[in-house]
Image (spheres, rainbow, N blue to C red):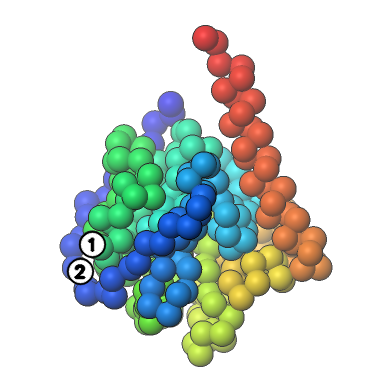
């Protein structure tokens, strides 16, 4: 394994959060908040699989950063993104920020691997943690919600400016913003301003989950790495793109396992 940067020290500033609920029905296990909003879903028969459209769509970060050295995730949830990345990016360090102790306590229920040399789950405030980081991450995935929606601190102009500073040159931020959030338009504008307009969005890729891919790079470099700011254009093609990305990663992992000497 190649050398990876040393982890940051955790910053503990914990705020209360509405308790999550776990529901199991047949082969499905979900993490929900009040009102039945599904935050994460797992197949008991295939716990590392990505079930929800938005989770698959977030993996399109590989179109910008194919070989990340360090991924930062804001929000643990049921651990879908963590488990998938842990399995399919064997040389990548993963740091996860989660403010809710109740959510972290469910990691075994959702079969999230224990912390090790590559994975660390930090119980702390993401905005404060990222504010202290400078040039440490190749990818930042922002998927932090509680029962009230996206916390205000994760939608502020200061937060996205800090995210850009926390990225290495050539890195990418993926922000999951609900299209029906009253602050949606303001958040989109803040991301665009923080990243100097270097933002790609793939229409219809994840329904009401509006995903923004913000690049920490010059306009020329962004165009070279992925020239189409709207993916494949049509919603059904963008959904196909997300599924194709996930299928390719799974096939790559299978191929490596198959070639590994016994």
User: Is 228 displayed left or right of 117 in the figure?
Assistant: right
Query: Residue at the spot x=72%, y=71% of the render?
Result: 203
Q: Nearer the viewer, residue 237 or 130?
A: 237
Q: Splitting the image into 4 quarters, where does residue 36 fall?
A: bottom left
Seen from this angle, which residue lies furthest bottom?
182
**Residue 28 seen in the current view:** yes
Check if mark 2's residue and mark 1's residue have beta carbons within 8 Å.
yes
User: Is 237 displayed left or right of 199 in the figure?
Assistant: right
User: Is 153 displayed left or right of 232 in the figure?
Assistant: left
In the rendered image, residue 103, in percent from the top left (x then y), is placed at 30, 61
- Quadrant (top left/top right/bottom left/bottom right) for the N terminus: top left
Seen from this angle, which residue lies furthest top?
262
Instruction: Tell me which numbered mark, 2 or 1, is placed earlier along the sequence.
Output: 2
Residue highlighted by disc 1? 101
Query: Residue at the spot x=23%, y=62% of the render?
Result: 101
Instruction: For marks 2 and 1, give the CA distance.
Output: 8 Å
Q: Nearer the viewer, residue 78 or 182?
A: 78
Q: Splitting the image into 4 quarters, where does residue 131 fall?
A: bottom left
- Neighbor class of circle 2 (other Cα within 10 Å; few <14, some 14-19, many 20+) is some
Identify the element where label 2 is drawn: loop
Q: Nearer the viewer, mark 2 or mark 1?
A: 1
**Residue 81 seen in the current view:** no
Up/down of 156 relative to 205, above or below: below
Q: Nearer the viewer, residue 22 or 66?
A: 22
Up/down of 70 relative to 198, above or below: above
Up/down of 212 relative to 8, above or below: below
User: Is 132 displayed left or right of 221 in the figure?
Assistant: left
Q: Which mark is residue 14?
A: 2
């Amino acid at each position: 394994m190649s050398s990876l940067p040393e982890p940051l020290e955790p910053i503990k500033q914990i705020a209360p959060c509405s308790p999550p609920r776990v529901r199991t029905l047949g082969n499905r296990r979900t993490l929900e908040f009040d009102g039945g909003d599904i935050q994460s879903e797992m197949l008991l028969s295939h716990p590392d699989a990505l079930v929800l459209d938005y989770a698959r769509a977030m993996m399109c970060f590989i179109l910008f950063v194919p070989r990340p050295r360090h991924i930062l995730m804001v929000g643990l949830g049921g651990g879908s993104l963590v488990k998938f990345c842990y399995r399919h990016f064997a040389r990548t360090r993963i740091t996860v920020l989660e403010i809710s102790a109740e959510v972290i306590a469910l990691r075994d229920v959702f079969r999230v691997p224990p912390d090790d040399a590559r994975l660390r789950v930090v119980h702390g405030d993401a905005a404060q943690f990222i504010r202290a980081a400078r040039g440490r991450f190749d990818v930042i995935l922002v998927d932090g919600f509680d029962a009230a929606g996206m916390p205000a601190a994760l939608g502020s102009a200061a937060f996205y400016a800090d995210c850009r500073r926390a990225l290495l040159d050539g890195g990418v931020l993926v922000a999951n913003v609900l299209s029906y959030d009253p602050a949606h338009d303001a958040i989109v504008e803040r991301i665009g301003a923080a990243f100097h307009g270097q933002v790609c969005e793939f229409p219809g890729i994840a329904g009401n989950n509006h995903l923004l891919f913000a690049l920490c790079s010059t306009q020329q470099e962004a165009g070279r790495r992925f020239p189409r700011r709207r993916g494949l254009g049509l919603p059904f093609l963008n959904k196909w793109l997300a599924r194709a990305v996930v299928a390719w990663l799974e096939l790559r992992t299978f191929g490596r396992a198959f070639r590994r000497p016994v």
